[in-house]
Image (cartoon, rainbow, N blue to C red):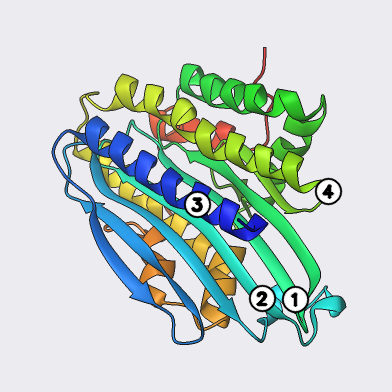
Amino acid sequence: MTEFDRVRTYLTDLQDRICAAIEQADGQARFVEDAWQRPEGGGGRTRVLRDGAVFEQAGIGFSDVSGTRLPPSASANRPELAGASWRATGVSLVFHPRNPYLPTTHANVRYFRAERDGQHVASWFGGGFDLTPFYPFDEDVRHWHHTAAQLCAPFGPTRYAEHKRWCDEYFFLKHRNETRGVGGLFFDDLHGDFETDFAYLRAVGDGFLDAYLPIVERRKDTPYSEREREFQLYRRGRYVEFNLVYDRGTLFGLQSGGRSESILMSLPPRVRWEYGFQPDADSAEARLASYLVPREWLD
């Protein structure tokens, strides 16, 4: 089995395991699969759960796509990739809960390989996970970051700090001067030793459920009113802004002729914008702002 096939096999299994766990946590809805083929090469399977007891929408996609020409978002700073053929595989998910007290979350793990005339040119791993609460709880955020730090520990004493900082910097809305949420891990262009890097990819992929499911159990039944729901929909607008303006995966997918429905499944099913919105002073909604700056969460 080639290195690429090993990664692909892991990713298809990861998608299956996460779907099973989320269906169990929701207790009502099931994922519906949309298998698709890409004319330029490859394909994937997009799975979406809608109108569940816990999740208003949960999308998780697996893709294995290839091409002969890289889009500008991937090749601008990589002149060695000019004229190379490429193949990329990954799993990406975004879960939008119904309850405003349960955070939205995103995770992605991926592998990219380029060749020219049958010879290896470049390959790397990327991925991470992050959390976007609307009504944050310190207990949840600390658990999220402790889980991230624990999975990073076997890969060196600086791995968590470096990839936590990278996440804070990447998921930052410059035009709003705020982070998208409370962070987590983010990494790209990881291309040292294949076995070590692949092990880290698996640690991040497997660690996602350990980080998120305890938060689901704690918050899914929290009572809420229309006020909290409206604030959730308003803050979902920031998620849309980031994904359409800054997200590299969205840009790569659209510029490489990817499947729009699968690329944009990360967008929430319901969202609203309000001009000049300002939360009431000292309100639970105003409290969120203090969390949308990089902070240290380990004891």
Name the residue carrying label 2.
Answer: 86
Q: Which of the two discs, 1 and 4, sits closer to the camera?
A: 1
Q: Which of the two discs, 3 and 2, sits closer to the camera?
A: 3
Distance from the alpha carbon under mark 1 to that under mark 4 = 18 Å
Q: Say if mark 1 contacts mark 2, CB within 8 Å.
A: yes
Mark 3 and mark 4 lie on one chain; the one further toward the N terminus is 3
Residue 130, label in figure: none
Within 10 Å of the Cα at label 3, are there few (<14), some (14-19), or many (20+) other Cα atoms?
few
Distance from the alpha carbon under mark 2 to that under mark 4 = 19 Å
Q: Is residue 105 left or right of residue 130?
A: left
Depth order, front residue of 175/119: 119
Distance from the alpha carbon under mark 3 to that under mark 2 = 18 Å
Depth order, front residue of 299/201: 201
Q: Say if mark 2 contacts mark 4, CB within 8 Å.
A: no
Name the residue carrying label 1.
Answer: 115
Q: Is residue 270 left or right of residue 116?
A: left
Residue 192, label in figure: 4
Q: Is residue 103 left or right of residue 254?
A: left
Within 10 Å of the Cα at label 4, are there few (<14), some (14-19), or many (20+) other Cα atoms?
few
Quadrant in the picture for residue 276? bottom left
The residue at 75%/82% (across/down) is 84
Mark 1 and mark 2 lie on one chain; the one further toward the N terminus is 2
Distance from the alpha carbon under mark 1 to that under mark 3 = 21 Å
Q: Residue 120 appears at what percent x and percent y? A: 79, 70
Name the residue carrying label 3.
Answer: 9
The residue at 73%/30% (across/down) is 160
> The disc labelled 4 sits on which kind of residue?
Gly
> The disc labelled 1 sits on which kind of residue?
Glu
Callout 3 secondary element: helix
Callout 4 secondary element: loop
Report whether residue 235 is seen.
no
Distance from the alpha carbon under mark 1 to that under mark 2 = 6 Å
